Amino acid sequence: MSKLTDAQIEKHLENLEGWDHYDDAIHTVFEFDNFMDCFSVMTRIALEAEKMEHHPDWHNTYATLEISLSTHDAGGLTEKDFKLAHAIEHIVGDE
């Protein structure tokens, strides 16, 4: 999969509220009511990421989940990152 241009990235970000682009990745932070809610979402994201064969870089502290997406093989962002970001948004929106 080929690396997206800055213009393509900005266009994709128009449909992803709360995601920022820097350091050749897109990033967001989610806050939950408690650890169990956060961990539940992480589990659902992990299952979806495994199906997509594309995995997030993430960090969890209690009820906070920080996510970064990038396609390391391409050296930046690809369509895979935005597909996973939309899947993550859908999962979080179901909570």
Image (tube, rainbow, N blue to C red):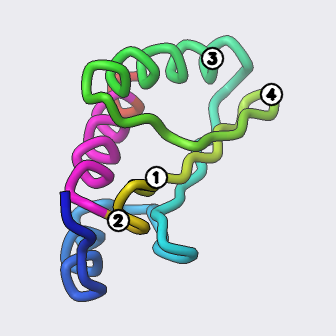
Query: Label 2's element?
Result: loop
User: Cβ–Cβ below 8 Å for labels 1 and 3?
Assistant: no
Kindly identify the residue that appears in the image at 30 percent across and 86 percent down: 6
Query: Label 1's element?
Result: strand
Out of 9 and 41, give the one closest to the viewer: 9
Q: Which residue is mark 1?
A: 69
Q: Please, what is the three-letter code of the amino acid marked with disc 4?
A: Tyr
**Nearer the camera: disc 2 or disc 3:** 2
**Nearer the camera: disc 2 or disc 4:** 2
Which badge, 2 or 1, is on the more N-terminal residue?
Answer: 1
| Real-space CA distance between mark 4 and mark 1, rounded to the nearest whole angstrom | 21 Å
Q: Which residue is mark 4?
A: 62
Which badge, 2 or 4, is on the more N-terminal residue?
Answer: 4
Q: Is residue 59 magenta?
A: no
The local crowd at label 1, few if under 14, some if 14 to 19, many if 20 or more residues have their Cα within 10 Å, is many
Principal secondary structure, stretch drawn in magenta: helix
**Nearer the camera: disc 1 or disc 3:** 1
The stretch in magenta equals 78-91
**Rendered-image quadrant of the N terminus:** bottom left
Kindly identify the residue that appears in the image at 67 percent across and 26 percent down: 33
Q: Please, what is the three-letter code of the amino acid marked with disc 2?
A: Leu
Q: Left or right: where does residue 31 sit relative to residue 4? A: right
Q: Left or right: where does residue 51 sit relative to residue 70? A: left
Out of 1 and 31, give the one closest to the viewer: 1
Q: Please, what is the three-letter code of the amino acid marked with disc 1?
A: Leu
| Real-space CA distance between mark 2 and mark 1, rounded to the nearest whole angstrom | 8 Å
- Relative vertical location of residue 42 with respect to residue 7 in this rendering, above or below: above
Q: Which residue is mark 3?
A: 39
Picture quadrant of residue 14: bottom left
Q: Please, what is the three-letter code of the amino acid marked with disc 3?
A: Phe
Q: Which residue is mark 2?
A: 77
Query: Label 4's element?
Result: loop
